[in-house]
Image (tube, rainbow, N blue to C red):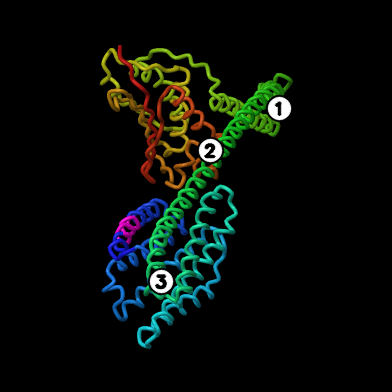
Amino acid sequence: MDNIDINTVQFMSTAILIVLSVLMLLLWMQNKDQSANGIWCIFSVLITIDTILSCFPEIRNMQYFVYLFNIDASFAYFALMVGCFKFSGIHINKKWMAALIITCVLLNSIGAYVTFNDVVRRVVIISINTISLSLSAYAIAHLSQQKFKLEKTFLLSLLAGHIIIHMFWIYLDFDISGANETLFSKSVTPMYLILILIILALLLLTLGMIRTLHEQKNIKSIAIKKELSAAVRDTNVANKSKSIFLANMSHELRTPLNIILGFSEALQIEMVGPLNEKQKSFVESIQFGGKRLLNLINDLLYLSNVESGKLDKNFEKVKPDIFLKENFKGLEEICHKYHNSLYYIDDSTECHDDYYLIINKVWMSQILTALVDNSSKYGAQKGNIWLNGFINDEKHIRITIKDEGDGIQSSEYKNVFKPFNRAGVDNRAIEGTGTGLAIVKGLVEAMDGNIGFDSRMGAGTTFWIDLPLYRD
């Protein structure tokens, strides 16, 4: 093969190696968690640089530079070896690796200042590279995953071919004169072909690993979905069991409790004879505790129905301003019980005559009662409470209830609508079970509404309800 043919092979190989190196880099940039792929990128780039320089022998064989290029080639094979070890999951002895690298650098550095026989220099560098190739083959041979069996066999064959060519060059003593020149030249083309195919095999292994990881993620995703489905089923069973338990409990507890309350009322009105002051005090305690326990049982049962959606959605059309005015008197009486004043700001008249709400009137009255009761209990003593209704946007009406209390601490915002949680005021002697706002939230959402609040410490709290407006 003449020089023109060799140059043509070099230029073609260089072009292909550049393309493969770019592909390797792009693949690594998309999957940076693959450490072996990153190290193989170094191998492909360094081999490509060495191949490019081989196209310019006047530069490649310059004094001093030839040793630098030898180090470049050796580092490329080191990168191939390290990548193969990482891909196979084999631990690398860092001391041996450091010793190999230092030996390579020292031999080439000494060669830059001490005149070596050219054959000796080439034998040394080829031997070091052959060691790296052999260790790479060792690592790939120990790749345990059967999914990569084809890629593994392909790469091992290429590495073996690469080592055979190195052995052949050492056998020739790098004598490229006479008949040996033809033999050496003929081995150049297979060498470039093997390097191209090695990088291609590394690309296939990387893609195979990425595919395997995606499959594992899909399997995990399917397993998680199955676990979630099982958890949902278990939750539904638990909720059903809870509902049955609460229904039974409410019946079993309310029946004897009503008997106790009935007898205590009979004692209180002295149906069986007069009571002294101490006895009256005992009866009042029975009445207070019994009624409080009965309220708790009723709230528990109602909360269970709200959470499970077992509510009678008896919805009807209601004019907002008319409904608020109808409920104002009852809400005012609640405030008076706590010595507070209730004021109604009638902004709902902004609604056109053809606007209306679709709500359960009993639920809505219960919601307003609970919110006004909360504002009265937790607001300022002998303070003011404002009830307002206004159009929030064209599709919703907002009903607000504002008090002059201490406000809610920001750290307790997340607990406001949780059942049996009184948002940081559990230590205060205020009657209540802590289920009121949880029930209110469930009822509002059952009417396709939203509920929230705004609060400032020392300035009071405003609870608001947004309900959808409809128009004829």
* Magenta stretch contains residue 13: yes
Residue 391, picture quadrant:
top left
Q: What percent of the width, then of the height, locates residue 315? A: 44, 14
Q: What percent of the width, then of the height, locates residue 310? A: 55, 20
The residue positioned 44% from the left and 75% from the top of the image is 125
What mark, if any, has residue 430 been given in the picture?
A: 2
Q: Going from the N terminus, do you reach mark 1 or mark 2 first?
A: 1
Say if 306 sits above or below 382 in the image.
above
The residue positioned 39% from the left and 46% from the top of the image is 457
Q: CA distance from mark 1 to mark 3?
A: 130 Å
Name the kind of residue labelled 1 in the image: Leu
Name the kind of residue labelled 2 in the image: Ile
Assign a secondary structure to mark 2.
Answer: loop
Q: Residue furthest front?
A: 179
Q: Going from the N terminus, do you reach mark 1 or mark 3 first?
A: 3
Front-most of residues 450 and 113:
113
Name the kind of residue labelled 3 in the image: Asn
* Residue carrying label 1: 275
Question: Bounds of the magenta span?
Answer: 9-18
Assign a secondary structure to mark 1.
Answer: loop
What mark, if any, has residue 67 been given in the picture?
A: none
Which quadrant, please, contains the N terminus?
bottom left
Q: What percent of the width, then of the height, locates residue 213? A: 51, 47
* Magenta stretch contains residue 191: no
